[in-house]
Image (cartoon, grey):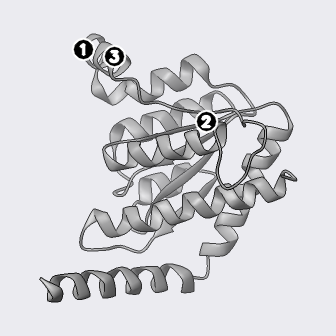
Amino acid sequence: MEDIIAFSLEEARKELEAFLTAPDTIPSMTEAVKIMAESLRNGGKIMSCGNGGSLCDATHFAEELTGRFRGSRKPLPAMSVNDPAYFTCVGNDYSFDQIFSRWVEAFGKEGDVLLAISTSGTSKNILMAIEAAKAAGMKVIALTSRKGKPMQESSDVAICAPDAPHSDRIQEIHIKVIHIMIEALEKELGF
């Protein structure tokens, strides 16, 4: 068991080191924070979506903005697409591919931001949400992996974890990115 633990921690360390040393990591995160801050300053909101563990990350991001991160501040307008009744309604009446895009069409507007999260970067429902966001005049920030070319190509900014043998390593980078972006966004907004 100790071998498994040691191996897993070392693998996670290597993935984080690869992410940190990639030349586009800090510039893309900086640009993403600037886009979100501009939207919030101008009365926009941030929407987030993802599947499975990425849905949990999208929800965590929104609740940290509307709630509290490290200190008290006014709530920031953010929402995650995570209502199970809505998912089953749209999935049944239309298709699972449209669960996020229809939400974006209903609530997204020009000046808003979509944080789209997918470890593979190829989830059809996430790609359709990105299309809907772009059609609405929203900016799109992709949180994906290096292999996620479709998301990288369709977003305004792509933050890419290194390719990893398993999605949990990518998700570990994603949650770190989410926490850092919230911290930087609060500072950028003067909190």
Residue 134 versus residue 67: which sits nearer the camera? Answer: 67
Earlier in the chain: of badge 2 and badge 1, it is 1
Residue 14 versus residue 106: which sits nearer the camera? Answer: 14
Instruction: In the rendered structure, find residue 85 and report the number of the disc placed on it.
Output: 3
Which quarter of the rendered picture does the N terminus lie within? bottom left
Give how far apart the Cα atoms at labels 3 and 1 are: 11 Å
Label 1 crowd (10 A; few <14 / some 14-19 / many >=20): few
Q: Are marks 2 and 1 in contact (CB under 8 Å)?
A: no
**Quarter of image, res 146:** bottom left
Label 2 crowd (10 A; few <14 / some 14-19 / many >=20): many
Q: Secondary structure at mark 3?
A: helix
Q: Which residue appears at 72% of the width and 37% of the height?
A: 76
**Quarter of image, res 43:** top right
Q: Which residue appears at 76% of the width and 32% of the height?
A: 44
Q: Secondary structure at mark 2?
A: helix
Q: Nearer the viewer, mark 2 or mark 1?
A: 1
Is 63 placed left or right of 164 in the picture? right
**Quarter of image, res 89:** top left
Label 3 crowd (10 A; few <14 / some 14-19 / many >=20): few
Give how far apart the Cα atoms at labels 2 and 1 are: 25 Å
Residue at the limit of the structure toward the left, as seen here? 1
Q: Would you place residue 190 above or below residue 75 in this image?
A: below
Instruction: In the rendered structure, find residue 134 and report the number of the disc placed on it.
Output: 2
Q: Which residue is mark 1?
A: 92
Instruction: Kindly identify the amino acid type of the residue bearing the numbered disc 3.
Output: Ala
Is 185 placed left or right of 177 in the picture? right
Instruction: Kindly identify the amino acid type of the residue bearing the numbered disc 1.
Output: Asn
x and y percentages locating residue 138 in the rendered image: 67, 35
